[in-house]
Image (cartoon, rainbow, N blue to C red):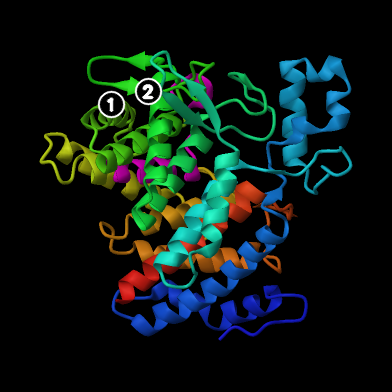
Amino acid sequence: MIERAIGGIGQAIKFTLTADIVSYANIMPDNTKNRSEAAAIYTEVYSEVISRAESQDFAGYDPFDGLESRLFKAIPLLSGSSLARIAWLQAVKRFPVNIRPLLKVPSGVNSKGLALFVLSELSLIRSGRRNAGPIYRLLDSLDELALYRKTNDGRTTRSFGYNFDWQSRAFFAPKGTPTIVPTAFAAKAYLEAFEMFGDIRYLNAADEVSLFILNDLRRPVESESTICFSYTPADNSIILNASLLAAEVLSRTGKLANKAVYHETALKAARFVLEKQTKEGSWPYGTRLRHKWVDNFHTAFMISSLKAIYDNSLADYGHPDSQSFSDAITRGVDYWISNFFLDSGAPKYFHNRTYPIDIHSSAAAIVTLCEIAEIREDAVSLACKIADWTLENMYESAGRFSYQINKFYKTKTEFIRWGQAWMAFALARLIETLGSKSE
C-alpha cells in the first residue's frame, strides 16, 4: 500500500519502491495479485501527474522551446541566424537548471502533449479506473489547436504544429508549422476516441489528418513500392520514425474507415523503413550522414508503428508481406531489448552509451513494451522493471518527473510534453496492460 507523505507522494513512493515494487519486475503472467498491487501503485502516481497537469491547464515548458525567449527574439542578429538559433536552443535545452523564466520563455499548451493526455485518459477509462467526463474537454481543447487547409477539390485537411519556433540542422519550422509528429499523435487520440465512443466526428478528424498526410506532406522518396513522407510540408528530410508515424495513421484510419488506398500507401512507407533496417535489427534516425545515430526512444517509436501497421493492414488480410514484416519487427525488438537497457531497468540513451538517461526513453519503452506484450513474453515484466526504476530515480514529488540523469548530475526541469505527458501515457498503458493480463 502507498502511504502519502507530507508534501506529496514522492518520498513515500521511494520507500515503497525499495520495499515492494522492485519485486514486481519479476511478475509472472499468472501472478494476478502482484499485478493488481503494481497497477494500484502506478494509478496513484498517474493521479498525481494528471492532477498537476490539470492544475496548470496542461501548459508547461518544453526542451525545445528556447527560441521563444523574448530576450532572444529582441536581438535580430541572433534570431535571424540559423546557427545562432541552433546554438541558443541547445544551450537552453542542455542547461542543468531551468533558466526559461529568466530568459522570458513563456509556458504553453503543446498539441502533442495534449494528445498524449487524451490517450492516457482513454487507457484509464478502458481499465475502469477513470470516468469519461473529462476526456471530452481534452478532445475539445485538442480541436482548438488544429490547423485546417482546403485542398483543390474542396476537402479539408487537419494538422497540428508545435507551440514554439524550432530549428534543426536540416530546416527551420516557425511556431505553428504543420508537423507530422504532433499531427500523428492527435490522430491516434481521435481514432481511439472513435473506437471507444463511436462518435463519427473523431473518425472524420482522423480522416482529415490522413488527407493532410496524402496531400500536404512531401515525398522525398517515392517509387512503385516505397514512399517516405517529409517531416513538414516545407522540407525534404528523410526521418524514418516520422514517416512511419504517418503510415501508422493511414493504416489505422484505413481499417476503421475501410479505405484500401490508405493501406496501400501505409505499406509503401513501412517497406521503405524495413529496407533501412540493419542485419542486427537496428534503424538509424534518418538516412543522411548527420542522422545515422541509433537511439532508444526513436527505435521504440518505430517498433510501435510497425506493430500497429502490421495489426491494421496485414494481420487479417493474408497479405504476402506479412511474414517479412513480422520478421523485421521481431529482429527490431530483439535488438532493442538486448542493447538499450541496463540490468536495473534504467534505459540507455544510445545502443553504445548510457547517458543521458532520459525520461522520454523510459516512457517510450514502457508504452512500446505494452504494445508488443502479445508477441514478447517478457515485455510486461520489463515494462514494470523500467517503470519501477523510473519512479525510484526520476519521480520527484507531487506529480513531477525529472528530465535527465547525467553521469554527475540530474536535470530536474519539468517538461509538459517530453516528460509529464509521456509518463502519464506510459503509466496509463501499463495499468491497462496489467489489468488485461490479470483478467
Please report contact status of discs 2 and 1: CB closer than 8 Å, yes or no: yes
Q: Residue at x 48, y 45 (%)?
A: 296
What's the residue type where badge 2 is placed? Leu
Report, in whole angstroms, how far the alpha carbon at label 2 lies from the one at label 1. Answer: 9 Å
Residue 362 visible in the shown view: no
Q: Which of the labelled discs sits on residue 214, or is there none?
A: 2
Q: Give coordinates of residue 129: x percent, y percent.
A: 47, 73
Q: Give coordinates of residue 138: x percent, y percent.
A: 56, 52
The quadrant where residue 309 appears = top left
Depth order, front residue of 147/175: 147
Q: Residue at x 25, y 56 (%)?
A: 375
The answer to whether residue 106 is above or below residue 348 is above
The quadrant where residue 187 appears = top left
Horizontal side of 195 relative to 241 (left or right) equals left
What's the residue type where badge 1 is placed? Thr
Residue 385 falls within the magenta-colored stretch: no
Q: Secondary structure at mark 2?
A: helix
Q: Residues within 10 Å of mark 1 (few under 14, many from 20)?
A: many
The answer to whether residue 398 is above or below residue 75 is below
Depth order, front residue of 289/215: 215
Q: Residue at x 58, y 19 (%)?
A: 170
Horizontal side of 105 relative to 304 (left or right) equals right
Image quadrant holding the N terminus, namely: bottom right
Residue 296 falls within the magenta-colored stretch: yes
Q: Residue at x 45, y 32 (%)?
A: 242
Residue 436 visible in the shown view: yes
The answer to whether residue 234 is above or below residue 254 is above
Q: Give coordinates of residue 207: x percent, y percent.
A: 37, 34
Image quadrant holding the C terminus, namely: bottom left
Q: Main secondary structure of the magenta part?
A: helix
Q: Which residues are magenta?
A: 286-309
Q: Which of the labelled discs sits on residue 265, or is there none?
A: 1
